[in-house]
Image (cartoon, rainbow, N blue to C red):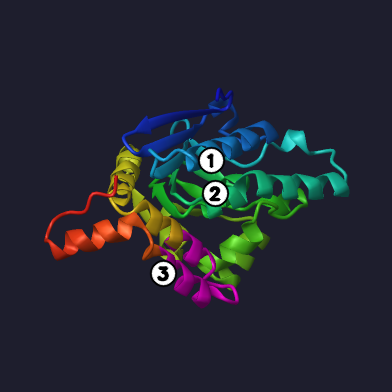
């Protein structure tokens, strides 16, 4: 599929998705959200891809928020439809993607940009990254899952402060708070993300898919039951046979 606002490159078993609107600091408009959603669908069904890395074009911004001009005159009903459609088209798809999604945060990750990063499974930030959910300064609240995912990552009190003060935090504080997994120099960001993706891609794709599903259920009633069921599912896979045979015969497993 051909896209106008994003670029996709494949590095071995890793797909790198680049949001390519640098003049707009890679802001998310509806077309870009739709394209990203289609890309996630496409890559999720590509058996040769094991990990997806999402980043922004340039070194200034991962995604510096939503394209405000697009919805400045929306009614309440249109605003609700915008949030619901965006969550369904993209943000929930990323969270539930059966393949690990890594957000490589280069520069600003604000509003919808931080929500995009939070929907991803793993977040790596460059040292110059700045993150925040400034929506209340515009008279609105985060609408792409920010009020739900941020408290899970950094706690309710910190989330309440960050959202209500419309503050930005730097990469170090984001790491200290658990918002990102690690912080690296700007020029090492993509290499770090690709190295991690390569390490992940050597493991069982079916087991990782089951793990993602179980981890996503950790705060739900029945989360432990989901783990039990997914644990059992793994026993019926070729990857389980390969992994256990490799261990017992003291060789490296081949999950291709």
Q: Is residue 22 above or below residue 212?
A: above
Q: Residue 85 sits in which quadrant? A: top right
**Residue beneath the point at 78% across and 38% down:** 71
The residue at which mark 1 appears reads as 40
Numbered badge on residue 4: none
The Cα atoms of the two marked residues, 3 and 2, are separated by 22 Å
20 with respect to 195 (left or right): right
Mark 2 secondary-structure assignment: helix
Instruction: Tell me the crowding category of disc 2: few under 14, some 14 to 19, or many 20 or more residues within 10 angstroms, Cα based.
Output: many
**Of marks 1 and 3, which one's residue comes earlier in the chain?**
1
Locate residue 97, reporting x and y percent: 51, 50
Quadrant into which the C terminus falls = top left
116 with respect to 165 (left or right): left
Instruction: Tell me the crowding category of disc 3: few under 14, some 14 to 19, or many 20 or more residues within 10 angstroms, Cα based.
Output: some
| Residue 40 in sight in this render | yes
Quadrant into which the N terminus falls = top right
Numbered badge on residue 94: 2
Instruction: Tell me the crowding category of disc 1: few under 14, some 14 to 19, or many 20 or more residues within 10 angstroms, Cα based.
Output: many
Q: Are marks 1 and 2 in contact (CB under 8 Å)?
A: yes
The Cα atoms of the two marked residues, 1 and 2, are separated by 7 Å
Magenta residue span: 211-233
Between 67 and 144, the one nearer to me in the picture: 144
Chief SS of the magenta region: helix
Mark 3 secondary-structure assignment: helix
Q: Is residue 217 above or below residue 174?
A: below
């Amino acid at each position: 599929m051909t896209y106008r606002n994003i670029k996709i490159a494949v590095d071995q078993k890793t797909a790198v998705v680049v949001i390519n609107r640098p003049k707009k600091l890679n802001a998310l408009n509806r077309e870009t959200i739709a394209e990203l959603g289609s890309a996630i669908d496409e890559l999720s069904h590509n058996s040769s891809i094991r990990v997806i890395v999402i980043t922004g074009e340039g070194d200034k911004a991962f995604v510096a928020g939503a394209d405000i001009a697009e919805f400045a005159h929306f009614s309440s009903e249109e605003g609700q439809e915008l949030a619901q459609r965006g969550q369904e088209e993209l943000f929930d798809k990323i969270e539930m993607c059966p393949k690990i999604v890594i957000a490589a945060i280069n520069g600003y990750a604000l509003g919808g940009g931080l929500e995009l990063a939070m929907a991803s499974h793993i977040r790596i930030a460059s040292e110059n990254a700045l993150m925040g959910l400034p929506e209340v300064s515009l008279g609105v609240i985060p609408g792409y899952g920010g009020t739900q995912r941020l408290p899970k990552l950094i706690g309710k009190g910190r989330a309440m402060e960050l959202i209500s003060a419309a503050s930005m935090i730097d990469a170090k504080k984001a790491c200290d708070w658990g918002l990102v997994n690690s912080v690296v120099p700007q020029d090492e960001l993509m290499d770090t993300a690709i190295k991690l993706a390569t390490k992940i891609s050597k493991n069982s794709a079916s087991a990782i898919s089951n793990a993602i599903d179980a981890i996503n259920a950790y705060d739900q009633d029945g989360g432990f039951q989901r783990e039990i069921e997914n644990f059992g599912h793994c026993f019926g896979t070729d990857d389980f046979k390969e992994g256990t045979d490799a261990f017992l015969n003291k060789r490296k497993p081949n999950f291709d």
